[in-house]
Image (cartoon, grey):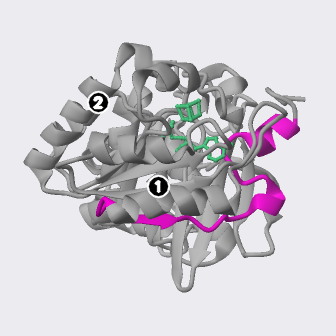
Amino acid sequence: MKYLQSGGNAMEEPIIVLELEYNQWLDLCTEKFGLQRYRTDQICQWIYQKKVFNIADMTNLSKELREDLVYKLLILPPMLVRQEISKDGTRKFLWQLRDGERIESVLLSHGNHMTACLSSQVGCPLACSFCATGQGGFVRDLSAGEIVGQFLAMEKIAGMDINNIVFMGMGEPFLNQEALFKSIRIFNDPKMRGLGARHMTISTSGIVPGIQALIKLQMPVKLSVSLHATNDELRNKLMPVNRQYPLGALVDALREYQTATGDRITIEYVMIDKVNDLVEQAYELATLLNGLSVYVNLIPYNPVEGRFKRSSAGRIKAFSAVLSEMNIEFEIRREKGSDINAACGQLRRRDGKDAKN
Ligand code: SAH
Ligand code: SF4
C-alpha cells in the first residue's frame, strides 16, 4: 500500500506503527530514529494505553521530536463510518479502511466485562449458506495493524479498557493466520497492549491446519469451533469448508489440541429451524463430541434473508435436554444486539456489499 505524504523533509513513506510487533518497533526506533528505549516505550504507552493516535499530542516528547516523527509514523486506526447501539448495550461499529473497504466490529458488555469481536478479513471466502458475510463474498485479508486498529479504536470510543477479544467478526481467522498471530502478539506484549492470551479466543469454521498451527504457537489462546452440523452430509451443505476438512479430521484436530493444551474447547452451534435442531441430531452431537472437554453454545439463528428460520424456544429446549442427559455442558446463548443486526456481516451488507462510495 502506498500512502501520500503530506509534507516534511523525509522522502520515505511513513511507517504504519500498528503493523509492528515490539521487537520491530524497537529496532526501528533505535536504529532508524536513534531514540532511546524509554522513548520507544513512551510512544507505545500513548498508543496502546492512552489511545492517543496523533504524534503531535504526545506531550512528553519534545516538540522537535514530535515534529520530526509526525511525518514518519502513521498510527491511524480505521475510520468510524457508523456506530449502532442496541437496547442491551451491544455496540456495533462499521469502519472504513485506508483503501475504502469496510469491516465491522462488535463490542459486547457483560457487567464490567467488555468483549470485542474483531474481523480478520474483508468478507469471507468460505460461503457458509447461513452467514451474511459468507454470502457477500471475499475481498481481502486484513493486515495485523487493521486487526489491532479495530480494537484500539473501540477502546478509544468506549472510553474504557476492553478485557476480552474474540476473533469472531467477519472472515475466517485461520485463513489469515500470519496477520492473526501477529495481532495476537501485539495485543499480548506487555510493552504494547498487555492483554493476556487467555483473554483471546479464535473462532474457526474448522480449518485443521490452523488448529495445528495454534498448538505450535504455544500461547494459551482459546479455541472456539463453529460446528453447526453433526454429520458430513448436512455440514457440507451448510459449510462448504467441510468438504476440505470433514468432521472426522476436524474432531481429530480438536483431540490433538486438547491433548497439547488441556484447554476446554467452545463449540458454537447456531440453531436453525428444522435443519440442525432435531432431537436425533442432539444425540449425534453428543456422540461426536464424546471424549472431548467442550462447552456448547447454542445460538438462536439470526435470520439473514428468507432461506432459514430461527429454531423456536421449544425446539431449542428439547435439543438442549438431550445434551443435559448426555452430560454435555452447554448454554443457550442470550441473543445480543439482534435489534441492530449484530450477526456478523449484516451491517456491512445492509450498507451495500462493498460500500466504498
Ligand atoms: N469464520 C469464523 C469466525 C466468524 S463467524 C467462524 O465461522 O467461526 C462467527 C460466528 O457467527 C460463527 O460461529 C458463525 O457460524 C456465526 N454466524 C454466522 N452467521 C450467523 C447468523 N446469521 N446467526 C447467528 N450466528 C451466525
Ligand atoms: Fe466465513 Fe465464518 Fe461466515 Fe462461514 S460463518 S462464511 S467461515 S465468517
Q: Which mark is residue 250?
A: 2
User: What amino acid does circle 2 point to?
Assistant: Leu
Q: Dot 1, crowdedness within 10 Å: few (<14), some or many (≥20)? A: some
Whether residue 281 is visible here, answered yes or no, is: yes
The picture places residue 318, in percent across and down from the top left corner, at 54, 59
Q: Was residue 334 drawn as part of the magenta stretch in this picture?
A: yes
Give the left or right position of residue 2, taking residue 88 as reference: left
Callouts 1 and 2 close, C-beta under 8 Å: no
Q: Where does ligand 1 appear, by image quarter?
A: top right
In this view, the residue in front, 222 or 311, is 311
In this view, the residue in front, 208 or 200, is 208
Cβ of mark 2 under 8 Å from ligand 1: the answer is no
Give the left or right position of residue 108, taking residue 48 as reference: right
The picture places residue 130, in percent across and down from the top left corner, at 66, 33
The picture places residue 251, in percent across and down from the top left corner, at 25, 34
Q: Residue reaching furthest left? A: 259
Q: Quadrant of residue 210?
A: top left
Q: Which residue is mark 1?
A: 166
- What's drawn in magenta, residue-wise? 326-351
Q: Was residue 180 drawn as part of the magenta stretch in this picture?
A: no
- Residue at 36% x, 27% y is 207
Give the left or right position of residue 259, taking residue 299 as reference: left
- Residue at 48% x, 60% y is 320
- Residue at 80% x, 74% y is 87
